């Protein structure tokens, strides 16, 4: 499904009105009806009948007025709290506000201290709160009045339904500059917004439901919208199918160049990630002195002991062996645990420069690239880069803070600049492509914040490429499956789960996606 920025949503809105002749009030009416229906569903469980609707002065507030009318018509006791002066209302919001006045609904225009006290009482009696303060029109830091309303709602402990996006969350980045509504559920209109998938916004949104408000499908599927989210359905259609007459040679060959003294685990996890996601054959190239360790740790993965330099690491002497492994493999994954010794880093750069077949570049190989990112322009190989924010900072020269403020933009720009596929890891992983297309992932959990899960992800993506997926599809499906495996592993305990647990859960994740209903 497409994901629309606030500007794109405004453009869609304008086209609906100008090209299709659907009045804005019709969209607002549909939006409000859908949000009201979510409130009714929520309250059906508890039998609650009191609702407090917080509205701002914009169209998000206007949606809230429709919610209030609908619920009042259905027998609910509704209190409207307006965090703006009535005189500032305009357009459709004013139309629907006037209807509420004519209906004689309880409306509290919050201006002074006594109004806040009244709002506090209304909230304390409410069974559910509706957040229609700020939507996609939020600019900058929420005003004091908005902050006070958000804090009042959050501190009530009452379930909150957010209209379009939790107030205080920036629709395009997911940033929360001061505070934001902590919603149980967000009902978003037409298309979801990036801030519902990017953190911290995603953590405020609760369960996200995308509702149809009558926007013509052509507009919602426009190729000009370059952000996407991935559903289980999408991933199911991408995953490799296993032919009845499959044999290990037909299920893809993955070459892995990983591991060094003290970091053999990274090589194990990357190789296991590849194997557990279905690769037919996985071959690990490793410094000769470490081979005995890996032979014991890995049963199904083949190992190649390669000549090493004086301190036992891969270096110039290993490059011909790397080239050979790459030629014999459908894809080569390079980087996890290789280390940052100068000679190893130089060898990595030389290998990438000369590579001709698909690559997955992770961890220490990203460090090697950060010295000379132009290598990506020189190699013939299409590369998937899998940086975490720290590695992205090294590659781009930005700070981790700058990256976290706009992950979508940073990943997209990097993919364009480097003509490579960029998987920016972290809560709400972003997969970006050189043509500007971006995918926002929704699977995964904080239990995955533990060493080695990134190695497993690199292995999954490499495995999917080896099994015949394009690097594009492998990156999108790989990130989703990785998060899903993390969710399955977390079902047995999120705190203390390991990267190994995640790798073990990959077959179950793939099975849950591919099994027949
Ligand atoms: N297709 C669409 O675009 C539709 C949009 N609708 C609603 O319209 C919303 C967007 O409406 P608007 O563009 O009017 O914007 P909003 O209603 O999201 O907010 C804009 C209002 O908030 C104020 N504001 C902005 N930043 C502020 C801050 N930091 N502190 C305090 N006040 C601030 C502005 O002065 C403005 O009055 C959507 O989120 C959605 O809820 C729906 O009515 C249905 C159709
Ligand atoms: K809102």
Image: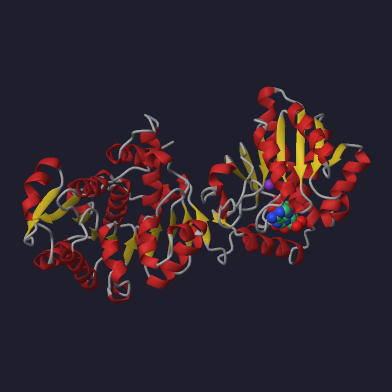
x and y, in percent, of residue 222 in the image: 59, 63
Residue at point 89%, 45% (across, down):
99
- Reply above or below: 354 against 8: below
Q: Which of 107 and 371 is in front in this view?
A: 371
x and y percentages locating residue 208 in the rendered image = 58, 43
For the residue pair 95 and 338, the one nearer the viewer reads as: 338
Q: In this view, does 26 lie to the left or right of 217?
A: right
Query: Residue drawn 11% across and 51% down?
Result: 303
Residue sitting at x 69%, y 26%: 44
- The answer to whether residue 27 of the structure is visible from this angle is no
Q: Which residue lies furthest to the front in this view?
A: 113
Q: Where is residue 255 in the image (x, y as percent from the top left)?
A: 19, 57
Q: In the depicted view, which residue is nearer to us: 254 or 137?
A: 137
Q: Is residue 315 left or right of residue 130?
A: left
Q: Residue 93: give x, y in percent of width and height.
A: 82, 52
Is residue 23 shown left or right of residue 177?
A: right
Q: How many labels does the image show?
A: 0
In which quadrant will I find the C terminus?
A: top left
- Residue 466 in sight in this render: yes
In this view, 70 is above or below 371? above
Residue placed most toward the observer, 494 or 118:
118
Residue drawn at the location 8% of the way across and 67% of the way down: 317
Location of residue 256 (image quadrant): bottom left
Name which quarter of the figure residue 324 lies in: bottom left
The colour style of the image is secondary structure
């Amino acid at each position: 499904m497409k994901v629309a920025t606030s500007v794109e949503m405004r453009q869609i809105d304008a086209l609906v009105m100008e090209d299709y002749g659907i009045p804005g009030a019709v969209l607002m009416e549909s939006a409000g009806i859908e949000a009201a229906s979510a409130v009714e569903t929520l309250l059906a469980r508890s039998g609650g009948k009191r609702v407090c609707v917080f509205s701002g002065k914009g169209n998000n507030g206007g949606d809230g007025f429709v919610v209030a009318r609908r619920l009042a018509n259905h027998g609910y006791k509704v209190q409207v709290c307006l965090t703006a002066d009535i005189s500032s209302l305009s357009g459709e919001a004013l139309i629907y506000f006037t209807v509420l006045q004519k209906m004689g609904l309880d409306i509290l225009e919050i201006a002074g201290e006594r109004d806040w006290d009244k709002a506090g009482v209304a909230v304390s009696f409410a069974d559910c709160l509706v957040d229609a303060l700020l939507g996609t029109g939020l600019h900058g830091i929420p005003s004091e009045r908005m902050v006070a309303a958000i804090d009042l709602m959050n501190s009530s402990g009452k379930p909150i339904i957010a209209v379009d996006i939790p107030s205080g969350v920036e629709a395009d980045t997911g940033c929360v500059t001061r505070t934001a509504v902590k919603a149980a559920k967000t009902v978003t209109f037409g298309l979801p917004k990036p801030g519902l998938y990017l953190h911290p916004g995603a953590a405020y949104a609760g369960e996200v439901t995308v509702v149809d408000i009558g926007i013509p499908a052509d507009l919602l599927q426009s190729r000009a919208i370059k952000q996407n989210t991935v559903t289980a359905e999408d991933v199911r259609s991408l995953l490799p199918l296993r032919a009845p007459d499959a044999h290990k040679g037909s299920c893809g060959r993955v070459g892995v160049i990983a591991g060094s003294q003290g970091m053999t685990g990274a090589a194990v996890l990357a190789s296991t990630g590849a194997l557990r996601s279905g690769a037919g054959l996985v071959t690990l190239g490793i410094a000769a002195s470490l081979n005995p360790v890996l032979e014991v740790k890995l049963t199904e993965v083949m190992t190649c002991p390669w000549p090493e330099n004086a301190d036992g690491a891969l270096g110039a002497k290993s490059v011909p062996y790397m080239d050979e492994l790459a030629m014999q493999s459908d894809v080569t994954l390079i980087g996890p645990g290789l280390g940052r010794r100068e000679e190893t880093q130089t060898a990595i750069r030389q290998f990438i420069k000369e590579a001709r077949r698909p690559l997955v570049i992770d961890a220490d190989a990203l460090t090697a690239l950060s010295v000379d990112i132009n290598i990506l322009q020189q190699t013939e190989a299409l590369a998937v880069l899998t940086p975490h924010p720290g590695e992205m900072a090294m590659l781009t020269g930005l700070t981790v803070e700058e990256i976290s403020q706009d992950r979508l933009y940073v990943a997209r720009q990097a993919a364009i600049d480097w003509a490579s596929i960029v998987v920016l890891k972290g809560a709400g992983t972003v997969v970006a492509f050189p043509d500007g297309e971006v995918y926002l992932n929704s699977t995964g959990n904080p239990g995955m914040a533990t060493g080695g899960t990134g190695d497993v992800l690199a292995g999954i993506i490499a495995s999917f490429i080896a099994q015949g997926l394009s690097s594009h599809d492998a990156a999108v499906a790989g990130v989703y499956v990785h998060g899903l495996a993390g969710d399955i592993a977390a079902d047995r305990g999120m705190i203390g789960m390991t990267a190994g647990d995640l790798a073990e859960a990959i077959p179950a994740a793939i099975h849950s996606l591919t099994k027949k209903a």
